[in-house]
Amino acid sequence: MKLRRADAERFERCIAAGGVAVFPADTVYGLACEPDNREAVAQLYFLKRRRPQKPAAVMFFSLELALEALAELGPRTRAALEALLPGAVTVLVPNPRARFALACGPDPGTLGLRVPRWSPALGALAGVRWPVLASSANEAGDEDASRLDDVPARIRSAADLVLDGGALPGRPSTVIDLRPFEQDRAWTIVRQGAVDAADVKSALESAA
């Protein structure tokens, strides 16, 4: 199922109005809201039955926008992001200005960053100009949703917008800790997911 520009515009309006949207990404179905809207973030966490202390990711819809917004990142870290993103990874980066604090949980000095690689069917979302707080569209601890029907009915009925992008790959993003990369090019995989460790290593070696 192919999304249209009108779907992306509906998504943007929903987020701007403080709503919570179910949407397809490059991995699994997600929930999204305005990252600095406390009420919207609380609603998203409530729908997931997720502890508010647990961090979420901030998703940008293009790498260019992410690098513009996080201008304080050092040159090595930026090179690493350019090697890894867009892609099915979540990258932990330093957050010295404590941006998007509602997504950071108890550690405002760390930001989880996502920039999906949009398939042709979902390419309309690449035009979204504003970041969102994003988390998988499931109840905390349950299986990720690769089809819209896999998203719990309770979540779909309570969301302000639901976008159907058809069948998705179904593996969550690989989580990579890049916080020490600026100093000594060190990194670790926190959660193995859609991108294999060997591919992460190859990408980061090319950025060094």
Image: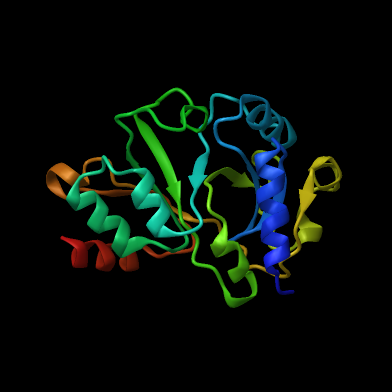
| Colour convention of the picture | rainbow
Q: Is residue 149 left or right of residue 25?
A: right
The single residue placed furthest to the bottom in the displayed view is: 120
Quarter occupied by the C terminus: bottom left
Q: Is residue 135 above or below residue 119?
A: above
The single residue placed furthest to the left in the displayed view is: 184
The x, y position of residue 80, in whole percent, is 26, 57
Please name whichever residue, 64 or 91, is drawn nearer the observer in this view of the structure.
64
Q: Residue at x 29, y 30 (%)?
A: 96
Q: Residue at x 33, y 29 (%)?
A: 97
In the rendered image, which quarter is residue 41 located in?
top right
Residue 59 visible in the snapshot: yes
Q: How many marks?
A: 0
Please name whichever residue, 135 or 141, is drawn nearer the observer in this view of the structure.
135
The x, y position of residue 33, in whole percent, is 64, 40
Residue 138 visible in the snapshot: no
Q: Is residue 186 above or below residue 126?
A: above
